[in-house]
Image: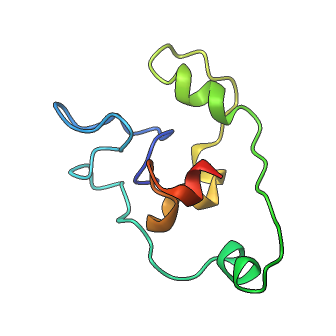
């Protein structure tokens, strides 16, 4: 499971709600190797990742109303440089 929300692993109790519970054995640690996005940015090539229902999944993760959202299909949700609160994630 990805280390950040949205994830199918709940946030840690009394922890940051933007993260998946790192104590859960299914949660991967944040990955730190270069992504295709990093390589494009290094060459000053504009790029974007589009994900259907991303914001909806964030806003409704506790409601059970996230239809067919595949948490594991969100590649940048696994990488430290795209963690919640980072400039890269905001863009």
Residue 89: x, y in percent?
A: 57, 53
In terms of depth relative to the viewer, which is nearer, 1 or 12? Answer: 12
Left or right: 20 as drawn, with respect to 76? left
Q: How is the protein colored in the picture?
A: rainbow
Residue 12 falls left or right of residue 72: left
The quarter of the picture where residue 70 lies is top right
Asked if 29 appears above or below 42 in the picture, the reply is above
Q: Vertically, is 90 above or below 29?
A: above
Residue 6 relative to residue 57: left or right: left
Residue situated in front as seen by the camera: 68 or 79: 79
Query: In terms of image quadrants, where is residue 46?
Result: bottom right
Q: Which residue: 64% across, 25% down?
A: 56
Q: Residue at x 46, y 38 (%)?
A: 8
- Residue at 31%, 36% in the rendered image: 11
Count of numbered circles on the image: 0
Q: Position of residue 44 (x, y in %)?
A: 79, 80
| x and y, in percent, of residue 84 in the image | 45, 48
Residue 14 percent coordinates (x, y): 16, 31
- Residue furthest out toward the left: 14
Which of the two residues, 51 or 48, is positioned nearer the viewer here? 48
């Amino acid at each position: 499971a990805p280390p950040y929300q949205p994830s199918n692993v709940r946030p840690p109790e009394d922890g940051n709600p933007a993260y998946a519970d790192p104590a859960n054995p299914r949660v991967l640690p944040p990955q730190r190797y270069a992504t295709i996005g990093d390589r494009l940015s290094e060459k000053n090539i504009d790029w974007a990742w589009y994900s259907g229902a991303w914001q909806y999944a964030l806003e409704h993760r506790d409601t059970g109303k996230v239809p067919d959202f595949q948490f594991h299909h969100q590649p940048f949700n696994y990488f430290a440089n795209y963690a919640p609160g980072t400039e890269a994630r905001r863009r």
